[in-house]
Image (spheres, rainbow, N blue to C red):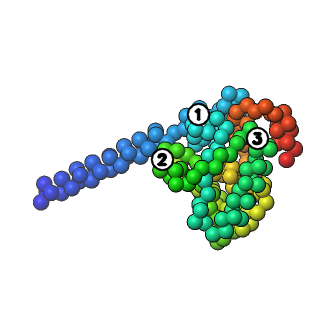
Amino acid sequence: MARIHITRRHNGNWIINLSVLLCNLNIIISKSCNNGTNIRGTILPLDWPCEWNSGEIPFAFNFYSIGLKRLMTIVKRAHSHLEKRSCLKFKELDPRWAKGDKNFTFLYYNFSGVLESCCLQFYKKPVGRRMVLITPVCSLPAEAAHATLHGMGLWHRKHEPFNEGTVRGALFYTQCHDLPQKLLLFDTN
C-alpha cells in the first residue's frame, strides 16, 4: 500500500513538473521579438508580434458573423481612421488561410450583438488569432479603432485613456513618407 501511495505521489509530481515546464516553454515561445521600444525609443505593447514590425497589420473577418456587411463597413472605416493618423497599414487575409498557421498573429473581427461595451481586450494568447469584438455601440470609426488598438495589445484601466507613449510607439513604429502630417493629426485628436 505504501508503495502505491509513493508511486502516485511521484507520478503526480512528474505531471506537475511537466506542466510547469510546458508553461515556461509557452512563455518563451510566445515572447515578442521586440525589446519593448522601437528605433525612436517609444514604448511598444509587451506582446507586439514580430510580423507586425513592418507596420502592416493582418486581419480577417468572421464570415459566419451576423451582420457581416455592417461589420466590414465599420472595421474598414476604423482602419481608415487609424491609417490617416499613423504609419500602419491593414491587410485583409482570407480567414481560411490565416487559421492554418498557429504561430501567425492577426486581428480577427467578429460582430457581437449581445455585448454592450466597445472597450474589450478579448484575446488570451499573444500569438495567433486575436479576437476583436465589434458591438452595436461601436459604430463610429474612432470607437472601432479603439477596439482595434485593444486587439493590437494596448490596454488601459477602466475609464482612463490609453498610455500616449504606448499608442505613439505602436502607431509610429515604422517610418512613413508623410510622418509630420500624421503626427500632427495624431496630436490634434
* Residue 19 drawn at (x, y percent): 36, 49
In front of the other: 88 or 164: 88
Q: Which amino acid does label 2 sit on?
A: Asp
* Residue 105 drawn at (x, y percent): 55, 46
Gap between marks 3 and 1, in whole Å?
Answer: 19 Å
In front of the other: 116 or 88: 88
Which residue in the protein does label 3 denote?
Answer: 86
Which residue in the protein does label 1 denote?
Answer: 34
Drawn side of residue 78 relative to residue 13, left or right:
right
Q: Vertical placement of 183 versus 61: above or below?
A: above
Q: Identify the residue at horizontal 73%, vertical 60% (top origin).
A: 73
Nearer to us: label 3 or label 1? 3
Q: Identify the residue at horizontal 44%, vertical 44% (top origin).
A: 26
Q: How many marks?
A: 3
Q: Identify the residue at horizontal 76%, vertical 47% (top origin).
A: 82
* Residue 8 drawn at (x, y percent): 21, 55
**Helix or strand or loop: what does disc 1 sit on?**
loop
Drawn side of residue 3 relative to residue 74, left or right:
left
Gap between marks 2 and 3, in whole Å?
Answer: 28 Å
Mark 2 closeness class: few <14, some 14–19, many ≥20 residues within 10 Å: few
Mark 1 closeness class: few <14, some 14–19, many ≥20 residues within 10 Å: some
* Residue 67 drawn at (x, y percent): 67, 68
Which residue in the protein does label 2 denote?
Answer: 101
**Helix or strand or loop: what does disc 3 sit on?**
loop
